[in-house]
Image (cartoon, grey):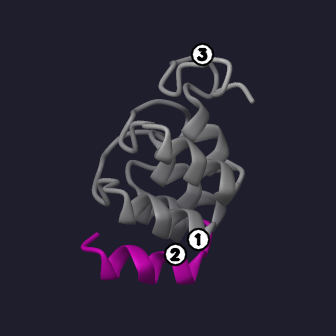
Amino acid sequence: LLLDKGANVNLQGRYHDNALYVASAGGHEPVVRLLLDKGADVNAQGGDYGNALQAASAGGYELVVKLLLDKGADVNAQGGSHDNALQAASVRGHELVVRLLLDRGA
């Protein structure tokens, strides 16, 4: 609804930084897909985890991680509280996400 009303899909905020980051951090795969289809920057930096891929990895959201990677997320992007997606997934014990990231070149 917000996008249909002209919301800027890449608008940066304060606490969560952007909509893609928030949707990824919550594991909301349909919303992540919609935002990406509407032109969300898959590698936008910001938030506690650094970017959407790191946020999804920290949450163990395998489907969201795969979607972000398929859409061009940088598997080795640096930043945030865990430095990269692999560390974010590893510290939380998300084995399937760790394997996926390693398979994609982390």
Q: Is residue 21 above or below residue 10?
A: below
Q: Tag 2: residue type? A: Val
Residue holding disc 3 = 14
Q: Can the viewer see residue 81 in this picture?
A: no
Q: Tag 1: residue type? A: Leu
Residue holding disc 1 = 63
Q: Quadrant of the C terminus?
A: bottom left
- For label 2, the SS is helix
Q: Residue at x 40, y 44 (%)?
A: 42
Q: Quadrant of the N terminus?
A: top right
Q: Is residue 43 magenta?
A: no
Q: Is residue 49 above or below residue 84?
A: above
Real-space Cα distance between discs 1 and 3?
A: 26 Å
Q: Residue at x 58, y 72 (%)?
A: 62
Real-space Cα distance between discs 1 and 2?
A: 9 Å
Query: Is mark 1 in CB contact (under 8 Å) with mark 3?
Result: no
Residue holding disc 2 = 97
Q: Can the viewer see residue 8 in this picture?
A: yes
Real-space Cα distance between discs 3 and 2?
A: 27 Å
Residue 68: x percent and y percent?
A: 44, 58
The range drawn in magenta is: 92-106
